[in-house]
Image (cartoon, rainbow, N blue to C red):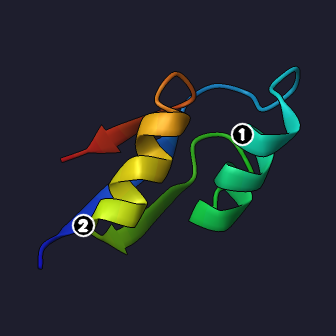
Amino acid sequence: MSTIKIKQIKSRIGAPADQKRTLDALGLHKLNRVVEHESNPSILGMVDKVKHLVTIVK
């Protein structure tokens, strides 16, 4: 499968605990950090859950 790069663009402060756990599971701990993951349904589901906090980098 292909890989996707995910960048955190908004702060986790004020987000519900489950969204904070999702960011941790994606490996995003600070703003403007970019992580690379395989593009599979579980990763895409996590990105969809926190879509207002992250963006996909080309």
**Above or below 16: residue 14:** above
| Residue that appears at 26% across and 68% down | 40
Mark 1 residue element: helix
Residue 50 picture quarter: top right
Give left or right: position of 1 versus 34: left
Point out residue 25 in the picture as x, y percentages from the top left corner. Answer: 66, 65
Residue 31 picture quarter: top right
**Above or below 15: residue 47:** below
Location of mark 1 (residue): 19
Point out residue 55 in the picture as x, y percentages from the top left corner. Answer: 39, 35
Distance, label 1 to label 2, CA atoms, is 19 Å
Residue 33 — which label? none
Residue farthest left in this picture: 1
Q: Which amino acid lies under the numbered mark 2 shown in the image of this protein?
A: Ser
Q: Quadrant of the N terminus?
A: bottom left
**For mark 2, does the 10 Å Cα neighbourhood hold few (<14), some (14 to 19), or many (20 or more) residues?**
few
Q: Nearer the viewer, residue 24 or 34?
A: 24
Q: Which amino acid lies under the numbered mark 1 shown in the image of this protein?
A: Gln
| Residue that appears at 38% across and 69% down | 36
Give left or right: position of 51 versus 21: left
Give left or right: position of 18 versus 13: left
Residue 39 — which label? 2
**Mark before the other along the chain sequence, 1 or 2:** 1
